Image: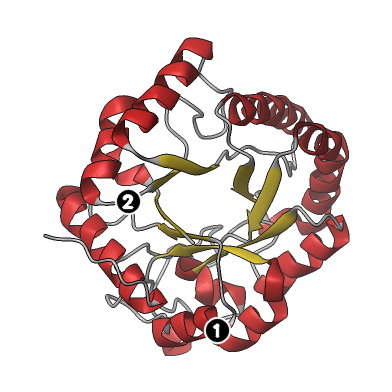
């Protein structure tokens, strides 16, 4: 199993400093999420061969590896011109992954839940263009449903992964999205059972149930505004059933990627990152412990 850090809370550090910080915190893997100086959110990758060469050297020197590259682009539309740009960005990001010797990428379905049918059509159109590129380059893909995307639910994600029908396309389960995945029930066991071996990647962070209190846990004005709310908190700070998550993962002999995806505590990022690594190790039954 690979225990990885999503270094979003360290975006203020240089690329080299981020790598060194990951090693200092005790993580062996980095999940390389969007950065303005590498693969930014929704924009063309800002990286050249020299930067890739440097990153590989810095990782080697620090004793850390890249578990996956995480790009986010508008590949599910609904705007066609932006979709075309997203496909172009994806092709370059795949090249970057190959040059980094990284054979796995993970991402979100994207699009909008308010244009579900159109976004699905655009997503399939993008995948028609990109599937041959992934296969030619030998790069695998893990996908997650995400709040506000055209696929928000667990079963919706599983249906689409089955529809794509490639053994190298599998599921990311983000614990911070649990209450979106099954409309507020937060019932982990049946979701993990339905995923089975397709569950290859778990993002760990806690969140509150936005459906609680008759839907009045969060009040957004004006009513009906196109917005969604969730958190990425430390395990134990909110309402996700981590006892069941860890129990099911051990029953399933999960051997994929487990990523710390807490974003809430930039002001005390080192404390949060160390705490989360320990909680993941304890919950997953991994023996090694860290200090601090």
Q: Residue at x 87, y 61 (%)?
A: 163
Q: How many marks?
A: 2
Q: Nearer the viewer, residue 48 or 238?
A: 48
Q: How far from the left and from the top, in percent, is residue 72?
A: 58, 40
**x and y percentages locating residue 105 in the rendered image:** 62, 43
Question: What residue would you read off at disc 2?
Answer: 27
User: For the point 40% across and 48% down, which residue is it?
Assistant: 6
Residue furthest left in the image: 292
Which label belongs to residue 167? Answer: none
Quarter of the image for residue 241 reads bottom left
Q: Quadrant of residue 98?
A: top right
Residue 73 in sight in this render: yes
Residue at disc 2, secondary structure: loop
Which residue corresponds to mark 1? 188
Relative side of 88 to 286, left or right = right
Residue 215 appears anywhere in the view: no
Q: Using the image, determine if residue 127 lies above or below residue 42.
A: below
* Residue at horizontal 74 percent and vertical 34 percent from the top: 83
* Residue 174: image location, x then y, percent: 51, 65
Where does the image place residue 112, in percent across and percent down from the top left?
67, 53
Left/right placement of residue 28 relative to residue 126 reads: left
Viewed as shown, does residue 256 lie left or right of 58?
A: right
Disc 1 secondary structure class: helix
Q: Above or below — where is 175 with respect to 15?
A: below
Query: At 35% from the left edge and 44% from the top edge, which residue is drawn?
Result: 7
Q: Is residue 2 above or below residue 122?
A: below
Q: Relative to 228, is 106 above or below? A: above
Quadrant in which the C terminus appears = bottom left
Mark 2–mark 1 distance (CA, rounded to whole Å): 26 Å
Which numbered mark, 2 or 1, is in the foreground of this view? Answer: 2
């Amino acid at each position: 199993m690979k225990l990885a850090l999503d270094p979003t809370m360290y975006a203020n550090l240089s690329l080299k400093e981020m790598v060194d910080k990951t090693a200092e915190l005790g993580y062996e893997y980095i999940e390389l999420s969007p950065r303005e100086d590498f693969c930014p959110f929704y924009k063309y990758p800002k990286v050249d061969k020299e930067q890739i060469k440097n990153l590989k050297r810095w990782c080697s020197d620090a004793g850390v590896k890249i578990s996956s590259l995480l790009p986010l682009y508008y590949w599910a539309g609904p705007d066609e011109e932006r979709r075309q740009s997203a496909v172009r960005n994806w092709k370059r990001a795949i090249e970057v992954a190959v040059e980094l010797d990284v054979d796995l990428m993970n991402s979100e379905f994207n699009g909008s839940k308010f244009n579900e049918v159109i976004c699905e059509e655009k997503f399939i159109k993008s995948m028609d263009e990109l599937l041959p590129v992934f296969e030619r380059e030998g790069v695998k893909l893990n996908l997650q449903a995400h709040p506000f995307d055209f696929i928000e639910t667990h079963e919706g994600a599983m249906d689409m992964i089955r529809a794509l029908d490639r053994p190298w396309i599998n599921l990311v389960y983000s614990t911070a999205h649990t209450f979106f995945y099954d409309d507020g029930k937060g019932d982990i066991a049946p979701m993990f059972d339905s995923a089975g071996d397709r569950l290859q990647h778990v993002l760990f962070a806690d969140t509150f149930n936005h459906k609680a209190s008759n839907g009045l846990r969060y009040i957004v004005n004006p009513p009906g505004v196109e917005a969604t709310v969730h958190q990425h908190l430390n395990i134990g700070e909110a309402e996700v059933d981590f006892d069941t998550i860890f129990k099911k993962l051990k029953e399933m002999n999960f051997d994929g990627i487990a990523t710390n995806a807490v974003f809430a505590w930039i002001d005390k990022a080192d404390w949060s990152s160390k705490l989360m690594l320990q909680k993941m190790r304890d919950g997953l039954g991994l023996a090694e412990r860290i200090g601090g």
